[in-house]
Image (cartoon, grey):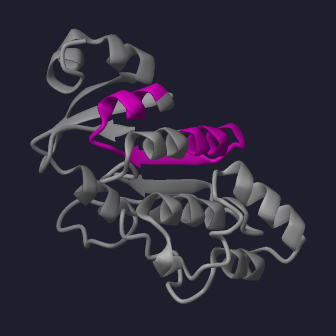
Amino acid sequence: ALTGPNGCGKSTLLKVLAGQLTVVSGQARTLVTSTYLDQHLGALEPARSVLEQLQSLNRQLSEGELRTRLAQLGLNADRINLPSHRLSGGERLKAAMACVFYTQSPPQLLLLDEPSLGLAPIIVKQIFQTLRELAKSGMTIFLVEQNAHHALRLSDRGYVIVNGQIRLSGTGEELLHNQEVRKAYLGGI
């Protein structure tokens, strides 16, 4: 997880890794297949339903199996037949993660940019539960997130960036208990 204040370079770094921004000096590369998801979720086709999109990505699973897996991610059965553009922000994020998770050739690395942005707390909790499941399945997740508490609880390794520089690093647990991080990003709790 990479966390830090607004405007410090979190999303910029992720976009460089995803190949969406050109590196001016130095280099950035990932050595594995990756998928980049941001809050705009360009991974979904707006006019197609979630179920249709998943069926085109994974022909090995039956419609019933896909429905079961979508329900496990918290997507209601009555919503998965709607065009993606009619889903709420939280539903679109879950659907995009399902498209990554259930594709026949899932990426080795998932790059996520601010998945909790603008979502209700209950949806944020569900999203992070889904991310835990993805991580348990063996997928590596590079999470850029301003919500330090959620990001660091999820992460094996965490980094705090300030003004474009990595200021702190350690396990997610270490950073959650670091007094500087607690004071600056966790409200001193």
Q: Residue 69: x and y, percent?
A: 77, 56
- Report the number of numbered marks: 0
- Residue beneath the point at 27% across and 12% down: 178
Give yes or no for residue 134 being in the magenta stretch.
yes
| Location of residue 138 (image quadrant) | top right
* 35 relative to 8 in the view: left or right: right
Q: Please say whether residue 35 is visible from this viewpoint.
A: no
- Residue beneath the point at 24% across and 22% down: 186
Report the front residue among 79 and 11: 79
* 173 relative to 63 in the view: left or right: left
Q: Residue 6: x and y, percent?
A: 14, 46
Q: Please say whether residue 82 is visible from this viewpoint.
A: yes
Residue farthest toward the front in the current orientation of the protein? 78
**The N terminus lies in which quarter of the figure?**
top left
| Location of residue 21 (image quadrant) | bottom left
Report the front residue among 44 and 8: 44
Q: Residue 172: x and y, percent?
A: 42, 23
Up the image or down, 107 lies above or below 80; here it is above
| Location of residue 39 (image quadrant) | bottom left
Q: Residue 24: x and y, percent?
A: 17, 68
Up the image or down, 158 lies above or below 113; here it is above
- Residue beneath the point at 47% across and 46% down: 123
Q: Which residues are magenta?
A: 129-153
Residue farthest toward the bottom in the current orientation of the protein? 47
Give yes or no for residue 169 being in the magenta stretch.
no
* 130 relative to 87 in the view: left or right: right
Up the image or down, 123 lies above or below 88; here it is above
* 107 relative to 117 in the view: left or right: right
**The C terminus lies in which quarter of the figure?**
top left
